[in-house]
Amino acid sequence: MNLFMYNGLLWLTSPFVKAHLKSRMAEGKEDPNRFYERYGEPSRVRPEGQLVWIHAASVGEAVSVLPLIQALVARREDRFVLLTTGTVSSAKVMEERLPAGAFHQYVPIDTKEAVTSFLNYWRPQVAIWMESEIWPNLINQTSIRNIPMIMLNARMTSSSFNLWRKTGGLAKSLIKKFDYIHAQTDIAAERLEYLGAEKVETLGNLKFCSPPLPFRKEPFKVLKDATAGRKMWLAASTHKGEEAYIAAAHIDLRTKVRGLLTIIVPRHPDRGDEIMEKLDQAGFRVARRSRGDAIGPDTEIYLADTIGELGIFYRLVDVVFIGGSLVQKGGQNLLEAARLHCAIMHGPHMNNFEEIVQDMHQGQAAVQVKDGSDLITATYKLLTEIRIRTDLASNASQVVKSGEALLGHLVQEIETSMTGDSS
């Protein structure tokens, strides 16, 4: 495959692309008020001065790059950061968390017309891709304009590597355009070099540099008071199929742990109605956060189907199960819980975070459970044995400190890439 063929396929499928985007908008997955941004049309004025453009796929990548954004805008008054993502949830989170001097736009769809419109308007001095976001037109058109390109926290799973190898010269022609790549692991670096990367460094994971998730003090205090004295555990970022495991665990554990409270935070809050219906049918006493239910003494399960509040719940509990891992969804990020001194469990399906899982297990900082029965056993042990719980949480805190030296090096690489800005 080459770029000509890629654009030919895009042209042939353009009616389907438009239909797909409209379908996503109907499902709430696209922002109707900013939909034109997906076609490269801006929704704000470009600030005068130096513009650093950073692209991150979704919430996890966007959150991981926040410390870098803060460092970049703090070093020059005339420097601004444009962050692009492709999801509504990431836009909402970034609206609250981006520092002064940084702002968000939706990434354009990867057609030549949309990308051209985007780049002609914003004219960034450097373009930074997070992790493994590879969009042929976005990369090619950026290179044509001689905008320095950097890939940070690059990862390359075996499945992605095999897919890109099959594209022949296209992958190599795109990867070679990056002036600098920072890879998460040696394996990722080797795969990227095979695909054509020329300057690759392996310096750790940028996600280790992220600050703790924010939280609002007043809602946290309300929940802290409502749950005082109770044993609790949290199932964070759960996906469809996992709530059944959590509910079954609660049924078993409530006979052994008096007054147990199970908190469920679904990865996609719009599944709240579906989850609530099943919990009601099973006879649980449930309080639901999205409708303002208070936690009472007899509440068994608290369904926290809201966006951007994991920081509250990681601070509220000591024991956490990370979702997307008992079903084949690739898992969710363990580091957010690790920063807030949680004892962490996860399932066997963590292929989206292989490197982080490896680091956590080497540091004896997380427990893997293979199925629902294993989840019950591990949760009971962590709820009832304080020494094991405390050691696991302390080890997790130590693991996340290991990447803090990386940030300064990456800032220097970015500034060096911009002509006349090596200070």
Image: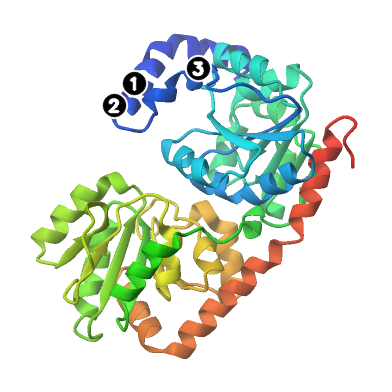
386 displayed left or right of 233? right
Identify the residue at image location x=59%, y=50%: 64
Mark sitting earlier along the chain (1/3): 1
Q: Is residue 373 visible?
A: no
- The residue beneath circle 2 is 26
Residue 119: image x %, image y %?
65, 19
Point out which mark residue 22 bears: 1
78 displayed left or right of 346? right
Q: Nearer the viewer, residue 90 or 282?
A: 90
Q: Are marks 2 and 1 in contact (CB under 8 Å)?
A: yes
Provide the secondary structure element on which disc 2 rests: helix
Q: Is residue 196 above or below residue 234?
A: above
Mark 3 → mark 2, Cα distance in angstroms: 18 Å
Provide the secondary structure element on which disc 3 rests: helix
- The residue beneath circle 3 is 39
Q: Quadrant of residue 129?
A: top right
Identify the residue at image location x=45%, y=36%: 87
